[in-house]
């Protein structure tokens, strides 16, 4: 899956997302919905757990754009955020 991925953060992701929650923030929700995988988001990147067979997984890392980083910080700080589209880049 290691490629650039287009992610649409919806109003529902913003409304239902949990501030400062790596697995439940607006970005994690939007990415997880897009790739149908478990996702963890940090301040600057996202990790997607890719199944490898059985219970084994491989964690793939993606870089957030500067715009997505700023909007994620605003979300975590409780500031208003509007829906947006971004690209996460495989690293």
Image (cartoon, rainbow, N blue to C red):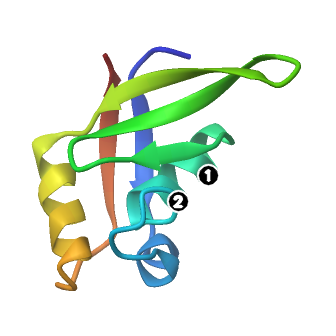
As drawn, 50 above or below 66: above
**Which residue is at a point 53% across and 33% down the rendered structure image?**
48
Side (left or right) of 22 relative to 84: right
Place of residue 67 in the rendered image (x, y in percent of width and height, measured from the top left): 13, 51
State the image quarter where residue 64 is shown. Answer: top left
Question: Quick one: label 2, few (<14), some, or many (20+) residues within 10 Å?
Answer: many
Q: Secondary structure at mark 2?
A: helix
State the image quarter where residue 87 is shown. Answer: top left
Side (left or right) of 64 relative to 51: left
**Which residue is at a point 33% across and 52% down the rendered structure image?**
85
Is the Cβ of the residue at disc 1 closer than 8 Å to that at disc 2?
Answer: yes
Residue found at the far right of this picture: 54
In space, the residues marked 1 and 2 are separated at their CA atoms by: 6 Å
Q: Quadrant of the N terminus?
A: top right
Q: Nearer the viewer, residue 64 or 9?
A: 64
Question: Quick one: label 1, few (<14), some, or many (20+) residues within 10 Å?
Answer: some
Q: Nearer the viewer, residue 55 or 6?
A: 55
**Which residue is at a point 17% across and 79% down the rendered structure image?**
77
Q: Nearer the viewer, residue 23 or 36?
A: 23
Q: Which mark is residue 67?
A: none
Q: Quadrant of the C terminus?
A: top left
As drawn, 73 above or below 66: below
As drawn, 17 above or below 57: below
Place of residue 43 in the rendered image (x, y in percent of width and height, measured from the top left): 22, 50
Residue matched to label 1: 33
Side (left or right) of 60 relative to 32: left
**Number of numbered discs present?**
2
Place of residue 76 in the rendered image (x, y in percent of width and height, measured from the top left): 24, 73
**Which residue is at a point 44% across and 76% down the rendered structure image?**
18
Q: Which mark is residue 29?
A: 2
Place of residue 38 in the rendered image (x, y in percent of width and height, measured from the top left): 63, 43
Q: Secondary structure at mark 1?
A: helix
């Amino acid at each position: 899956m290691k490629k650039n991925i287009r992610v649409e953060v919806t109003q529902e992701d913003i409304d239902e997302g949990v501030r400062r929650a790596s697995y439940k923030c607006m970005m994690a929700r939007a990415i997880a919905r897009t790739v149908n995988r478990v996702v963890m988001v940090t301040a600057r990147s996202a990790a997607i757990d890719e199944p490898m067979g059985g219970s084994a997984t491989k964690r793939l890392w993606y870089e957030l754009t500067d715009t997505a980083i700023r909007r994620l910080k605003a979300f975590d700080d409780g500031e208003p955020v509007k829906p947006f589209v971004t690209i996460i880049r495989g690293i």
